[in-house]
Image: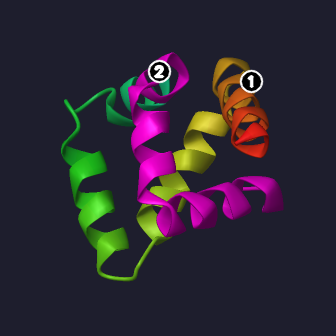
């Protein structure tokens, strides 16, 4: 995961309103679909719980997987750009 994406994640952790706005956006919904594909979101749920307890390793691994595909990388870039505008 690149530094820009790590900064975006930290920014979202610090700003719940921004996170809510992202999750309601088209790109946020697309990201959630990519992260929850395959097991109806069970892995994402476990990763989110782990991150909430202070261990973000699993959610970072999932983000890295998303970013391996061209569509996922472009999606994360769009989200990064939109976060800079807010």
| Mark 2 residue element | helix
Q: Residue at x 57, y 36 (%)?
A: 66
| Relative to 9, 53 lies left or right | left
Q: Nearer the viewer, residue 62 or 86?
A: 86
Residue 23 position within the rendered picture, expressed as x and y whole percent measured from the top left: 41, 34
Q: Is residue 2 magenta?
A: yes
Reply above or below: 1 against 82: below
Does the magenta stretch mainly form a helix, a strand or a loop?
helix
Residue 18 position within the rendered picture, expressed as x and y whole percent measured from the top left: 51, 48
Q: Tell me which numbered mark, 2 or 1, is placed earlier along the sequence.
A: 2
Report the Cα–Cα distance between label 2 and label 1. 11 Å
Residue 41's tag is: none
The quarter of the image holding the C terminus is top right
The quarter of the image holding the N terminus is bottom right
Q: Residue at x 30, y 48 (%)?
A: 44
Q: Is residue 31 magenta?
A: no
Q: Nearer the viewer, residue 86 or 6?
A: 86
**What residue is disc 2 on?**
30
Reply above or below: 39 against 13: above
Q: Residue at x 66, y 34 (%)?
A: 79
CA neighbours of label 2 inside 10 A, class few (<14), some (14 to 19), many (20+): some
Residue 73, located in which quarter of the rendered image? top right
Residue 65, located in which quarter of the rendered image? top right
State if disc 1 and disc 2 touch (CB < 8 Å): no
Reply above or below: 29 against 36: above
Residue 27 position within the rendered picture, expressed as x and y whole percent measured from the top left: 54, 22
Residue 74's tag is: 1
Residue 71 position within the rendered picture, expressed as x and y whole percent measured from the top left: 67, 18
Q: Residue furthest bottom?
A: 54
The span picked out in magenta is: 1-29
Q: Residue at x 79, y 35 (%)?
A: 81
């Amino acid at each position: 995961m690149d530094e820009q994406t790590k900064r975006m994640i930290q920014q979202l952790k610090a700003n719940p309103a921004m996170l809510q706005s992202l999750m309601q956006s088209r790109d946020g919904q697309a990201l959630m679909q990519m992260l929850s594909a395959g097991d109806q979101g069970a892995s994402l749920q476990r990763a989110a719980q782990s991150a909430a307890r202070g261990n973000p390793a699993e959610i970072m691994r999932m983000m890295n997987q998303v970013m391996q595909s061209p569509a996922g990388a472009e999606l994360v870039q769009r989200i990064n750009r939109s976060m800079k505008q807010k």
